[in-house]
Image: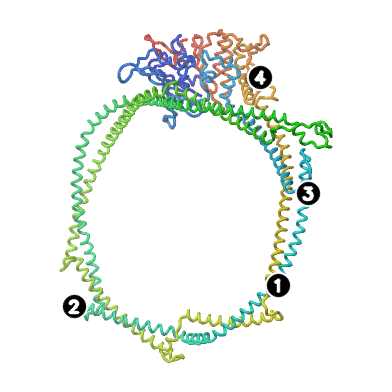
């Protein structure tokens, strides 16, 4: 951690803003904070500590006395500190609570404590927290040290300087844990403890599983009559042998049932063969009857098939004439249509020629070519004629835009003339709004704090009812548990009293008594009137256990309710909701006024920015308008020239028609009619030639065929699909006849020598059903026996594995428990030192070694710090003790036995050794800035020289050390200084880099 800059305003003895630039001392590495007594030297360290933690080392009562007594009621108090931790730069700003004049009415009001934390990101300060609580939480994460630890290793204040040397092992452990980040070792010990508990739970679960499997096997053996008669064995070996015997008996039963199933299977196969033979004979008789019926039906359909065969033969002969017949028909239709179209086109041409005053006998091709050339010229002129209105409209619009731009320029000049006065008015309004909005953050902090207390007060009232209910439930559960316990005790006593009667009930003449061994029983005890059975006692014990568990749950609920109620009451601060609601309303009103002022300030600033931006935009817009005006005037002149040229071309192309488009339409229509008439004449001639050729080919082919004329050939043509259907029908009939005759012959030969009477299948089916039922029963019995044998075999394997696993788990659980106890500092750990303390003790040894390098020099070799791992009393942390070894006596003694000057030297050496070791640790808290407040006056000149030499060595590695002292020799030896001077009127000032005179 390195400090960069400190600013103090209205703090301690300082009234006006005072600034300390710690970076200016980086080159020297060590600087002196000097000044006369009471000037405020220690207040600089107070400001550092207050900025980081909201408290100071000299005042245990908080920040109530931090505001300067020189401040007027309306003057602020504030501390700001810039520092770096790792590679991140931070700035914290704090202000204590103080009284200031009320802004409404008279009197004073409380300015609440405020804090703000910012981080430097890309050369800009970014807010990270804005409430004292949030700032404190985030700084705890950033710094890694609490206020007490900070005062022991960085800010070595007057009354905190020797705390690390003289503290107990427990306090020293807390500081070292924060500095070296060793809490993970505590987590290791906790994790090992959890693993030990988990291993024990797993061991219990494995043992319970083994017992459950053994009981399951015994139940299975008993349910299937595989156990020996007599009492069941009780010891584990006998029970396991009984399971093995049951497994063998189940295997023997399975083997017997398997033979019975084989016999049933053979009987069923014989019955099945007999029934299958009779079924096959009956099937052959049925198939022969159906085959004869099918052959008779095919013979009856032979006449229809013969007619189809004749129709198919003529159709196939006519199929070769299908194409010529179809071609002739199409040619005739095309020729007729072409002749009709030619007649219509010729009539249309004569009408058009008459209207246009053209001779109908004119060569049509020449006329079409002439009209096409003229139309090309007239179409171009028609396009210009159609475009002319748009061009004229564009010309008028251009002239209008020129006039609009001229008017816009005049209006823009008039508006810009009013801007300066409006900007002046906005500046005055913004100043007034900013002054009113300055109270926003304090008002919000106060409102939030009151709201939190009000919520806590309401929660306290709500939790009071829950607390009463929980305590009543706890009382009732405790009463029920006590009653259930007394019931079990009473039943146990009755059970003991009735044991003699129960034993007497089992006695028989001639059999020995289980108590005295006699075979005679002259006076057996009478049974109890109301005996206590195992079931009654078990039920009572279950009720007692349930009641006890309910009492524990009720106790936990009541305890949690008391804790929640106490915590809520503490957060409420002891105030009632009604009072807090009044305070919240007042704070909300104050906050609302500040928010309204802030909103008005922001709106006015935005309006001023917008007005300034609009004025700039208006100036730029005027330049654009002036430029556009010139461009529009040039465009209008060019359009005027274009419109006049288009009008001349249109006048030449219009001729006698009202518009060029009319002349184009008339000429185009005449050309189209002439072109259509010529095309129709040529097409009609071509289609007639095709018709004559197709008819001649058709007639020649019919003459060479079996048909007499065209009509008979057309009637004989059949559709290809119909022909395919007829062919398939004929082929299928022929195939069916052949197949039917062959099947009848085959079946007659197969059934030769058998009776024609139908076979009866009922008897063979009944025999088959009976054999099948017997086989099913045999299979079921075998399956059940097989499942039983497999189940017992699997259970035996699982039982052996479970007990073997329990033995392994017991060894593992014992090893883990021993390791967890050792790491946690319990037996067999004779030093009672847990793992984290062991690691911290090693770190402390290094700190002591580093401190002794300096303490030996400063004490001229007399004193050395010595680490002690002696066990502490009453469960305190062991292994973190410190002693002083005196070379004069050769004895170790407590650090508390040192004199004031000796304690200062030892504390300084230990603090510097601590700083050195912590800084050298990768990932630890780097201590780049240290302060030492007083204590040098207790040293003689020679010892002071040694101490100064030690401090001078600290500059190595870029560390900066600040020293507060009255000693004149130090002012002479340290040129880099902060001088704190009290002004004649009381407030102090800080003068930096003052050089002490030689």
Answer few, some or many: residues within 10 Å of disc 1's Cα (few below 14, many 20 plus, some between 14 and 19): few
What residue lies at 60% left-to-right and 14% top-to-bottom? 855
Task: Calculate the distance from the C-alpha at mark 2 to the C-alpha at mark 1.
Answer: 105 Å
- Residue indicated by mark 3: 248
Frontmost of labels 4 and 1 is 1
Q: Of helix, strand and loop, which one carries label 3? A: helix
Is the C-beta separation of discs 2 and 1 under 8 Å? no
Which sits in the foreground, 186 or 351?
Answer: 186
Q: Which residue is mark 1?
A: 277
Along the line of sight, the residue nearer the viewer: 448 or 850: 448
Examine the rendering and report whether any part of residue 32 can be seen.
no
Q: Tell me where residue 123 appears, x and y as whole percent.
A: 42, 30
Per the model, the C-alpha gap separating discs 4 and 1 is 103 Å
Q: Which residue in the protein does label 2 denote?
A: 354
N-terminal label among 4 and 1: 1
The percent coordinates of residue 47 (x first, y second) are 45, 18
What residue did someone put label 4 on? 869
Q: Earlier in the sequence, mark 2 or mark 4?
A: 2
Image quadrant assignment for residue 456: top left
């Amino acid at each position: 951690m390195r400090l960069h800059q400190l600013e103090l305003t209205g703090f301690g003895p300082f009234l006006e803003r005072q600034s300390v630039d710690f970076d200016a001392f980086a080159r020297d590495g060590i600087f002196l904070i000097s000044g006369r007594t009471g000037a405020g030297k220690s207040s600089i360290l107070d400001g550092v500590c207050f900025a980081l933690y909201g408290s100071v080392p000299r005042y245990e009562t908080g920040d109530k006395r931090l505001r300067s007594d020189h401040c007027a009621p309306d003057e602020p108090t504030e501390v700001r500190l810039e520092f770096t931790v790792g590679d991140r730069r931070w700035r914290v700003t704090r202000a204590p609570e103080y009284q200031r004049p009320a802004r409404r009415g008279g009197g004073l009001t409380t300015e609440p404590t405020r804090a703000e934390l910012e981080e430097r990101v890309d050369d800009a300060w970014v807010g990270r927290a804005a409430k004292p609580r949030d700032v404190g939480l985030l700084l705890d994460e950033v710094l890694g040290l609490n206020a007490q630890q900070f005062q022991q290793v960085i800010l070595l204040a007057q009354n905190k300087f020797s705390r690390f040397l003289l503290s107990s092992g427990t306090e020293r452990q807390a500081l070292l844990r924060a500095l070296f980040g060793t809490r993970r070792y505590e987590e290791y010990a906790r994790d090992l403890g959890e693993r030990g508990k988990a291993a024990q739970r797993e061991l219990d679960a494995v043992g319970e599983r083994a017992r459950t499997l053994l009981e399951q096997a015994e139940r299975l053996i008993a349910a299937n009559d595989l156990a020996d008669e007599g009492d069941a064995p009780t010891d584990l070996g006998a029970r396991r042998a009984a399971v093995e015997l049951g497994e063998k008996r189940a295997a023997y039963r399975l083997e017997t049932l398997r033979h019975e199933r084989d016999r049933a299977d053979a009987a069923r196969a014989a019955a099945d063969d007999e029934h299958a033979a009779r079924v096959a004979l009956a099937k052959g008789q049925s198939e022969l009857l159906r085959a004869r019926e099918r052959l008779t039906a095919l013979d009856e359909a032979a006449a229809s098939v013969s007619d189809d065969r004749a129709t198919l033969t003529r159709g196939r002969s006519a199929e070769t004439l299908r194409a010529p017949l179809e071609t002739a028909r199409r040619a005739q239709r095309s020729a007729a249509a072409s002749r009709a179209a030619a007649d219509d086109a010729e009539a249309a041409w004569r009408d058009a020629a008459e209207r246009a005053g053209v001779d109908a006998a004119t060569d049509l091709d020449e006329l079409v070519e002439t009209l096409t050339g003229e139309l090309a010229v007239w179409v171009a002129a028609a396009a210009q004629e159609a475009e002319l209105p748009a061009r004229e409209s564009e010309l008028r619009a251009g002239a209008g835009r020129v006039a609009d731009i001229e008017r816009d320029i005049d209006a823009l000049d008039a508006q810009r003339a009013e801007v300066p006065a409006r900007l002046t008015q906005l500046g005055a309004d913004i100043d007034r709004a900013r002054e009113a909005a300055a109270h926003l953050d304090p008002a919000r902090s106060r409102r939030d704090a009151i709201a939190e207390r009000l919520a806590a007060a309401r929660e306290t009232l709500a939790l009071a009812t829950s607390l009463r209910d929980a305590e009543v439930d706890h009382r009732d559960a405790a009463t029920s548990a006590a009653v259930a316990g007394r019931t079990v005790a009473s039943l146990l006593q009755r059970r003991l009293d009735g044991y003699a009667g129960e034993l007497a009930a089992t006695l028989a003449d001639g059999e020995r008594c289980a108590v005295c061994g006699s075979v005679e029983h002259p006076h057996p005890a009478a049974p109890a009137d109301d005996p206590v059975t195992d079931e009654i006692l078990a039920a009572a014990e279950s009720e007692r256990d349930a009641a006890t568990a309910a009492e524990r749950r009720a106790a936990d609920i009541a305890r949690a309710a008391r804790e929640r109620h106490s915590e809520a009451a503490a957060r409420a601060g002891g105030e009632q909701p009604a009072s807090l609601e009044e305070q919240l309303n007042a704070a909300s009103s104050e906050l609302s006024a500040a928010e309204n002022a802030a909103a008005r300030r922001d709106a006015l600033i935005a309006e001023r920015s917008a007005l300034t931006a609009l004025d700039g935009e208006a100036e730029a817009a005027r330049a654009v308008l002036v430029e556009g005006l010139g461009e529009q005037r040039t465009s209008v002149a060019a359009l005027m020239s274009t419109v006049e040229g288009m009008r001349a071309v249109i006048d030449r192309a219009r001729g006698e028609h009202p518009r060029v488009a009319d002349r184009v339409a008339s000429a185009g229509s005449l050309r189209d009619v002439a072109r259509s008439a010529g095309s129709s004449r040529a097409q009609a001639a071509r289609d007639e030639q095709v018709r004559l050729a197709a008819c001649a080919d058709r007639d020649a082919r019919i003459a060479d065929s079996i048909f007499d004329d065209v009509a008979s050939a057309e009637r004989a043509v059949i559709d290809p699909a119909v022909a395919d259907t007829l062919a398939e029908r004929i082929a299928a009939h022929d195939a069916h006849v052949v197949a039917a005759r062959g099947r009848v012959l085959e079946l007659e030969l197969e059934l030769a020598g058998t009776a024609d009477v139908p076979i009866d299948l009922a008897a063979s089916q009944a025999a088959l059903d009976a054999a099948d039922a017997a086989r099913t029963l045999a299979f079921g019995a075998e399956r059940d026996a097989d499942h039983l044998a497999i189940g017992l075999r699997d259970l035996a394997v699982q039982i052996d594995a479970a007990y073997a696993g329990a033995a392994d788990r017991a060894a593992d659980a014992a090893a883990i428990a021993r390791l967890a106890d050792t790491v946690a500092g319990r037996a067999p750990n004779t030093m009672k030192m847990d793992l984290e303390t062991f690691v911290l003790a090693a770190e402390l040894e290094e700190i002591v070694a580093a401190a002794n390098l300096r303490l030996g020099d400063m004490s001229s070799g007399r004193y050395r710090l010595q680490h002690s791992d002696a066990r502490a009393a009453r469960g305190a942390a062991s292994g973190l003790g410190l002693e002083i070894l005196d070379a004069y006596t050769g004895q170790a003694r407590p650090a508390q036995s040192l004199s004031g000057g000796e304690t200062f030297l030892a504390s300084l050496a230990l603090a510097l050794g601590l700083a050195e070791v912590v800084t050298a640790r990768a990932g630890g808290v780097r201590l780049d800035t240290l302060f030492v407040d007083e204590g040098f006056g207790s040293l003689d000149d020679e010892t002071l020289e040694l101490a100064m030499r030690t401090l001078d060595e600290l500059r190595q590695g870029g560390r900066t050390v600040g020293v507060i002292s009255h000693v004149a020799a130090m002012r002479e030896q340290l040129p880099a200084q902060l001088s704190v001077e009290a002004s004649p009127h009381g407030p102090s000032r800080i003068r930096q880099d003052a050089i002490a005179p030689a």
